[in-house]
Image (cartoon, rainbow, N blue to C red):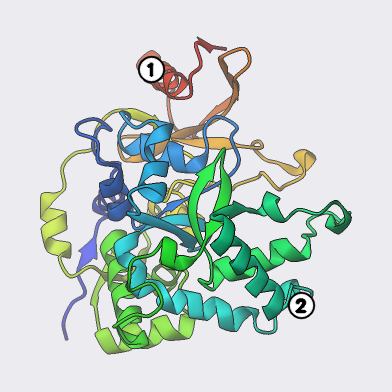
Amino acid sequence: MQTIPVISNKQARRLWLSTNLLLQAPTGPLDVYGIIHSLGFVQLDTIQVVARAHHHILWSRNQAYREHMLNPLLADERRVFEHFTHDASVIPMEFLPMWQRQFQRFRAKFANNGWFKNMSGPKERAAIKARIAAEGALSTHAFDSATERPKEMWARPAHKKALDYMWYVGELATCHRRDFVKFYNLPENVFPDHRGTSPLTDAAQLDWLCRAALMRLGFGTQGEVQRFWDAASAKEIKGWLGTALPREVMIEGADGSLTRSFAADDIEARLDALTPPSTRLRILNPFDPAVRDRARLERLFGFEYRNEMFVPAAKRKWGYYVYPILEGDRFVGRIELKAERKSSTLTVVNFWSEPGVRWSTARQSKLDSELRRLARFVGCQTLA
């Protein structure tokens, strides 16, 4: 009987940080597209307490990054497209042939979905397409009607539901953003010639997505493989694992427990290539891919982290928008920040060190240095 190899907790943590481009210092030549490609996707988010999530995520990998550098990849070069993984994200355009099943999944999902039951019908959607064909790219504001605005919280007007539906199923595509407002265009004006179909079967697309997920995870359980792209069901992932038979490993958690997982094909080479982590201290975004899977984060690092933005203030354990603090290969604290752009001030609202972490003068100096770097990134002149 073959023994399943065990990957120590130290190796697992470093491998995970390496695949997330966080093991080494965020310096050197900048390749924005290369970062997105290596990560697989970068989540987009509207909240701008300090910096929007997608900009912060890219900056955390290379601090030469600036906010104006992302949109050209979408709007001019067409090297990335926007669609939905676990949330709205930018994805390398070369992954589009393998993303056709995601468009189809949303079409099937919304066929009987109550959210779209009052959506504009095929004729109304055809009219939206006709307007875009005649006028060029349009945002949702181009379809606004004062009489159409619903009063209920979270409610959306019919045209917005139609635009959402068409974007999810691939009938429209994001061509650019202006002040983070999405502009829609016809797919043929955004996607390459293979936009409407894929030469790959659905099974081949699923195989690619699973292998690409494992490559970017390094190792993962069935659930972690599924959650990476969120482009397949649990049944589909289980079926793929039973057919593809990827390498099995045991991953040691922060508490010493072992979790049976599946590994990338080159796992030995990756482990051999691991280097000690940078001693740099980094403030990560709450939507950073390294911390997005909270259960995986806690198992590997012993770091309990939850996003409390939608938790009532009185019930929050920490705060509204709290940033994890990574030092080397462990999380040493968390910090709540706010950028006041009118006064050009980055304010520390609150700070907590992790239990068992001695907050020395040297560690505080590293935090102060990172705060100054973050302040420069978002255009703040003062720390408070």
Quadrant the C terminus occupies: top right
* Residue ID for mark 1: 369
Q: Nearer the viewer, mark 1 or mark 2?
A: 2
- Residue occupying the point 52% across, 38% down: 52
Q: Is residue 218 visible?
A: no
Q: Which quarter of the picture shows residue 57?
A: top left
Within 10 Å of the Cα at label 1, are there few (<14), some (14-19), or many (20+) other Cα atoms?
some
Q: Nearer the viewer, residue 215 or 121?
A: 121
Mark 2, secondary structure of its residue: loop
Q: Residue 257 location in percent, x, y?
A: 38, 62
Within 10 Å of the Cα at label 2, are there few (<14), some (14-19), or many (20+) other Cα atoms?
few
Residue 173's place in the image compared with 329, above or below, is below
* Residue ID for mark 2: 117
Mark 1, secondary structure of its residue: helix
Q: Amino acid at mark 1?
A: Ser
Q: Amino acid at mark 2?
A: Lys
Q: Nearer the viewer, residue 302 or 39?
A: 39
Q: Earlier in the sequence, mark 1 or mark 2?
A: 2
